[in-house]
Amino acid sequence: MRTIICNSLQSFWDMADNHFLEGLDVHCVFPVNDAIKDFILAYQQQYKIKSVSFTNAFSRLE
């Protein structure tokens, strides 16, 4: 399994726009809200990304 780590939204878009993420698993380690997560997931098919996951390190504990 080859996973690309994206440290920022900008790095995700740069790599996706340059077709570096095609066929790969992507893990985002920057904070995202539901709107940004949904936006990225909506583009997963367009950029031919195998899977996208998000860190929970920034999740609030309740």
Image (cartoon, helix red, strand yellow):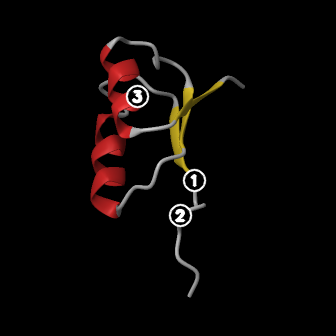
Give the quarter of the figure containing the N terminus: top right
Indicate the quadrant where residue 47 lies: top left
Contact (CB < 8 A) between labels 2 and 1?
yes
Residue type, label 1? Thr
Q: Label 2 sits on what residue type?
A: Phe
Q: Is residue 5 above or below residue 47?
A: below
Within-10-Å neighbours for mark 3: few <14, some 14–19, many 20+: few
Residue under numbered circle 2: 58
> Quick check: 31 above or below 23?
below
Secondary structure type for disc 1: loop
- Callout 3 amino acid: Ser
**Which residue position holds label 3?**
11
Where does label 1 land, which residue? 55
Q: Residue at x 54, y 45 (%)?
A: 29
Mark 3 falls on what kind of element? helix
Residue depicted at 34% across the width and 42% down the height: 40
Mark 1, Cα crowd under 10 Å, few <14 / some 14-19 / many 20+, is few
Q: Nearer the viewer, residue 57 or 52?
A: 57
